[in-house]
């Protein structure tokens, strides 16, 4: 059912930016990146340090893990932007992946546009059938200059 | 040998089980053999492309669900070039559900969708439209008759009128559709409903209100199917809250010649295939050899007066 993330051949340096339960969604991507021999940096965001998930898993797979939290005052978009801009300037980023935060999505769209870096996102939406029949789980996407609705269950959940 | 066949006007169906519009699409072919079904009923299409309503489009309520999908449609041309060819690989007749914003556009769409591969047209006159002040055509006998007459003149294909429970004139609307040339009635669409999240105080649906469907709705739709079957001589197709073969049999006994299964497919995608097997088992266990021995056999006797009484209330 549906489709997951892509890791294109030219995407060697991957940046994962996820928040809250979105961290769990992106964990399998780390495994895939490891198996394909890609370099992975993960910016993990949460409300507090004890809510940060999957850190051990990501580290065990060789990812460089950077944590930011609301409690420590490091997870605001300005701070995360500085962090990502720094990574781009120092070593470059070929693709970004995200899940779990609309704020981070908007930030990454903005940064991606400025630096011409492609990105993918895992989305969720309420579903009735989970097969593609009911048209409940749609999200709007900009495609060729217009907003089109695509189903999270079928065309996603990786977009 | 069990005879599961049933007749909807000119169409003979190999069994009385078919999907309800909006809960069925090509993707279900990945789950079971769609040729098991008595007919295929598509999601409602409109001539133009439509995105549908804002999300969330669905929410759960006790024993049922609400939806406000809003008829997203790929448009007529995509439907003709992509969807009709897909269903042509099956023997089951294809019933195309259509909607439009005006009676004239309903009629034009009927004409344009009357193409090879389409066996019947289900006209979704139970959706909101612009000509009648946000009301659905099927809420009133006069607007039902007007739109049905225009469509009748526009096509020779069988027309199935899908009625709405959002009316106090059930039998009058049913008779109006029949008088205007409908070949069958589908009874019925969803009941306008609402749900609010008490924490956020926001309606749970993006569109604020939506249609109630599922088991909790069944007694209402069954009552309407019964009233319609009593008041018209064209076939009635029962639809609303059917999730077991016993539910379907209830509709058949009430007078429906076939049934549509909707919300239950969301919970169990292969449920219609299972219901066909359950129907065979039921008939055998009852010592019956055909579905037709069930249709309209409700033992209502004197109680028929109640029907008149309720509908005559001011």
Image (cartoon, coloured by chain):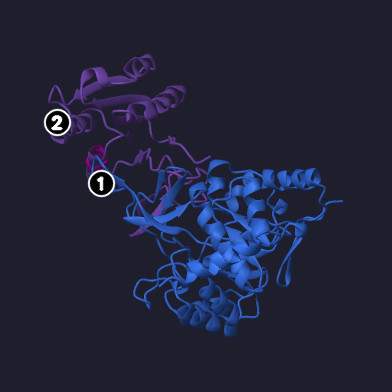
Chain colours: A purple, B blue
Q: Which residue is mark 2?
A: A79
Point out the tag, 2 or 1, that comes first from the N-terminus. Answer: 2
* Secondary structure category for the residue under label 2: helix
* Disc ID at residue A113: 1
Q: Nearer the viewer, residue B275 or B172?
A: B172
Q: In the image, B7: left or right of B202?
A: right
Nearer to us: label 2 or label 1? 2
Is B273 or B226 nearer to us in this picture? B226
Front residue of A89 and B202: B202
Q: Picture coordinates of residue A45 (x, y %)?
A: 24, 27
Q: Chain of mark 1?
A: A
Residue B147 on the magenta span: no
Q: Position of residue A98 (x, y in %)?
A: 32, 35
The magenta span reads A104-109
Q: Is residue B86 visible?
A: no
Relative image position of residue A146 (x, y in whole percent): 34, 60
From mark 2 to mark 1, how far is it between C-alphas? Answer: 19 Å
Number of dots carrying numbers: 2
Residue depicted at 23% across the width and 22% down the height: A67
Main SS category, magenta section: helix
Q: Which mark is residue B198?
A: none
| Residue B22 versus residue A105 in the image, above or below | below
Corner quadrant of residue A78 = top left
Quadrant including the C terminus of chain B: bottom left
Q: Disc 1 on helix, strand or loop? A: helix
**Do the residues indicated by labels 2 and 1 lie within the same chain of the protein?**
yes
Give the crowd class for mark 2: few <14, some 14-19, many >=20 residues within 10 Å.
few
């Amino acid at each position: 059912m549906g489709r997951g993330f892509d890791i294109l051949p030219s995407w060697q340096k991957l940046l994962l930016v996820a928040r809250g339960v979105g961290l769990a969604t992106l964990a399998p991507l780390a495994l895939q990146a490891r198996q394909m021999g890609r370099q992975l940096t993960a910016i993990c965001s949460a409300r507090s340090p004890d809510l940060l998930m999957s850190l051990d898993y990501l580290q065990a797979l060789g990812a460089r893990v950077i944590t930011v939290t609301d409690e420590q005052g490091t997870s605001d978009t300005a701070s995360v932007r500085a962090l990502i801009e720094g990574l781009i300037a120092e070593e470059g980023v070929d693709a970004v992946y995200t899940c779990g935060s609309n704020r981070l999505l908007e930030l990454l769209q903005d940064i991606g546009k400025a630096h011409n870096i492609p990105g993918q996102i895992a989305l969720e939406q309420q579903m009735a059938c989970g097969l593609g029949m009911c048209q409940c789980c749609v999200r709007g996407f900009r495609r060729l200059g217009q907003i089109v609705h695509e189903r999270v269950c079928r065309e996603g959940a990786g977009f | 040998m069990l005879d599961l066949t049933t007749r909807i006007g000119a169409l003979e169906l190999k069994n009385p089980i078919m999907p309800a519009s909006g809960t069925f699409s090509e993707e279900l072919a990945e789950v079971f053999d769609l040729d098991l079904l008595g007919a295929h009923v598509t999601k409602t299409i409109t001539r133009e492309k439509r995105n549908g309503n804002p999300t969330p489009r669905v929410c759960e309520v006790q024993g049922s669900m609400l939806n406000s999908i809003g008829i997203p449609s790929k448009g007529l041309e995509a439907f003709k070039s992509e969807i009709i060819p897909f269903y042509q690989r099956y023997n089951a007749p294809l019933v195309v559900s259509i909607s439009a914003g005006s009676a004239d556009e309903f009629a034009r769409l009927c004409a344009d969708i009357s193409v090879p591969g389409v066996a019947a047209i289900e006209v979704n006159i139970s959706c909101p439209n612009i000509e009648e002040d946000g009301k659905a055509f099927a809420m009133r006998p006069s607007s039902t008759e007007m739109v049905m007459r225009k469509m009748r003149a526009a096509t020779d294909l069988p027309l199935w009128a899908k009625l709405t429970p959002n009316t106090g004139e059930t039998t009058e609307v049913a008779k109006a559709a029949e008088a205007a040339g409908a070949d069958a009635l589908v009874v019925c669409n969803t009941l306008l409903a609402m749900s609010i999240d008490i924490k956020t105080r926001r309606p749970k649906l993006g569109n604020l209100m939506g249609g109630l469907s599922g088991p909790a709705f069944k007694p209402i739709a069954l009552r309407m199917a019964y009233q319609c079957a009593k008041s018209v001589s064209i076939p009635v197709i029962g639809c609303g809250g059917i999730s077991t073969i016993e539910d379907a049999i209830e509709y058949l006994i009430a007078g429906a010649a076939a049934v549509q299964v909707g919300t239950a497919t969301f919970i169990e995608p292969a449920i219609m295939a299972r219901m066909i097997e359950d129907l065979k088992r039921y008939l055998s266990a009852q010592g019956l050899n055909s579905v037709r021995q069930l249709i309209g056999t409700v033992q209502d006797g004197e109680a028929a007066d109640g029907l008149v009484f309720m509908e005559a209330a001011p």
